[in-house]
């Protein structure tokens, strides 16, 4: 069998992928651990959660623009049709969640005014209804998209591990440079 080198993602796409993943993981940890803190510390942690969320939103928009301007490498030819459909669906829903989660969170807190981002600058309040019902709706969207994101992350990681260790097609090398270029 002749092996063909499969191109990997470019450096900018790789950095954005891992930076956004790290920030999202940090945000889940921040919100999960905030519940057990005294109120003053809880408020500080939630403020950090908001800053990280706005950062995810900004970086996700940059990532989408980068992806439009720089085509990603094609999916490996060894993928089954169902794997191609699942990969595209998961990636599309990731982008929806990476934009939707911070937007819903931002909308949820807009009744209280601008959102400070690490004390460096403020994002203005969004022009959304400021009623309790609207806040509850935005909270529900924020929470449901976050749950969807966790499910997608599980599918994404399991799929990558399947390809790396069961199929041995080197898929992880497309996004992890030190693994070397994947081959099919």
Image (tube, rainbow, N blue to C red):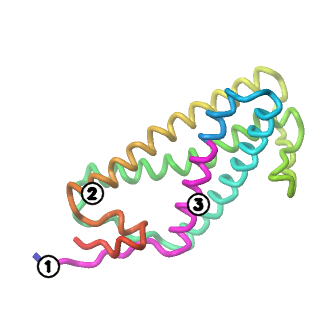
Badge 2 local density, few (<14 within 10 Å), some, or many (20+)?
some
Q: Main secondary structure of the magenta part?
A: helix
Q: CA distance from mark 2 to mark 3?
A: 23 Å
Q: Is residue 54 left or right of residue 161?
A: right
Q: Dot 3: what SS?
A: helix
Q: Hey, which quadrant is residue 73 in on the image? A: bottom left
Image x and y of residue 113, in percent: 89, 39
At x 76% / y 26%, what residue is drawn? Answer: 134
Q: Say which residue label 2 marks.
A: 163
Determine whether label 1 and label 3 are within 8 Å by CB: no
Give the CA distance from mark 1 to mark 2.
Answer: 19 Å
Tell me if residue 11 is in the magenta stretch: yes
Q: Is residue 163 above or below residue 3?
A: above
Q: Is residue 100 left or right of residue 42?
A: left
- The quarter in which the C terminus is drawn is bottom left
Q: Which residue is the site of mark 1? A: 2
Q: Residue furthest left?
A: 1
Mark 3: give few (<14), some (14-19) or many (20+) Cα within 10 Å. Answer: some
Tell me which segment is drawn in magenta: 2-27
Taking 52 as reference, is 86 left or right?
left
Between 51 and 136, which is closer to the camera in this rendering?
Answer: 51
Pinpoint residue 5: horizontal percent, then vertical percent. Answer: 28, 78
Residue occupied by mark 3: 19
In the image, is residue 22 part of the stretch drawn in magenta? yes
Q: Are marks 2 and 3 in contact (CB under 8 Å)?
A: no
Quadrant of the image occupied by residue 105:
top right
Q: Earlier in the sequence, mark 2 or mark 3?
A: 3
Question: At which x and y percent is residue 164?
Answer: 28, 59
Disc number lying in front (1 or 2): 2
Q: Which is in the foreground here, disc 1 or disc 3?
A: 3
Which residue is at 27% across, 49% downward? 82
Tell whether 26 sits left or right of 80.
right
């Amino acid at each position: 069998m002749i092996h063909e080198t499969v191109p990997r993602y470019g450096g900018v796409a790789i950095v954005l992928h891992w930076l956004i993943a790290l920030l999202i993981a940090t945000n889940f940890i921040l919100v999960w651990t905030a519940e057990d803190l005294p109120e003053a510390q809880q408020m500080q942690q939630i403020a950090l959660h908001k800053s990280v969320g706005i950062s995810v939103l900004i970086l996700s928009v940059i990532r989408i623009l980068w992806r439009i301007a720089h085509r990603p490498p094609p999916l490996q030819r060894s993928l089954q049709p169902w794997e191609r459909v699942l990969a595209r669906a998961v990636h599309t829903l990731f982008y929806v969640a990476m934009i939707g989660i911070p937007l819903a969170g931002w909308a949820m807190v807009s009744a209280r005014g601008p959102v400070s981002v690490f004390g460096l600058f403020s994002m203005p309040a969004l022009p959304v209804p400021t009623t309790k019902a609207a806040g509850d709706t935005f909270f529900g969207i924020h929470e449901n998209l976050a749950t969807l994101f966790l499910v997608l992350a599980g599918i994404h990681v399991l799929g990558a591990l399947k390809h790396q260790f069961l199929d041995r097609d080197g898929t992880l090398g497309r996004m992890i440079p030190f693994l070397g270029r994947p081959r099919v």
